[in-house]
Amino acid sequence: MPNTIKRSGDGLALQVTKPARTARLVEETDNESARLADIRVFAFGGLLLVIDIDRINDENIVELATSAALDTVSIHRVANASLQIAGNGYQVQLPGATDAGFHAGDRAPCTPAPNLLVIAAEGSGRVAADIVTIRKEQV
């Protein structure tokens, strides 16, 4: 079951422990975080891309963002964000989430791909799957 978006600080955040580990946005040694990725969040209508800016090259980022923009016919905001330790796991801050149509309390399915999380609103599952496929082909 997807986690729900919550208020955190002056914005929104999502608990992403398992997907972040799978996407290698978090690397741990002996159950302690050794590396938290530097991330950038791209907000589109009903879709958020959380990208590890150190591990996805600019050309691939452009391909992912262009595909998402064309599929959603939108782009709202691009901002650096933070991945943080929260509770027994990790959460990601989501600047631009409100612009993309997300609100506190919304269930937000989060799909990992190498160095990428794709967070999709209801009705955006196909676009999310396409973005994940593109990222897997890039690696």
Image (cartoon, grey):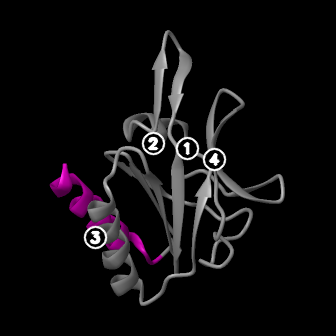
Work out whether mark 2 precedes mark 3 in sequence or the reverse, and give the earlier one: 2
Can you see residue 1?
Answer: no
Contact between labelled residues 1 and 2, with CB atoms less than 8 Å apart: yes
Work out whether mark 4 precedes mark 3 in sequence or the reverse, and give the earlier one: 3
Q: Quadrant of residue 108?
A: bottom right
Three-letter residue code for mark 3:
Glu
Q: Residue at x 41, y 84 (%)?
A: 72
Q: Of discs 1 and 4, which sits in the foreground?
A: 4
What residue is shown with label 2? 19
Disc 4 secondary structure class: loop
Q: Which portion, as a residue range, is magenta?
A: 123-139
Q: CA distance from mark 2 to mark 3?
A: 22 Å
Task: Report the side of 132 relative to 93 (left or right).
Answer: left
Category of crowding for the residue at label 1, using alpha-carbon neighbours closer than 10 angstroms: few (below 14), some (14–19), many (at least 20): many
Q: CA distance from mark 2 to mark 1?
A: 6 Å
What residue is shown with label 1? 16
Q: In the displayed structure, would residue 15 be above or below residue 48?
A: above
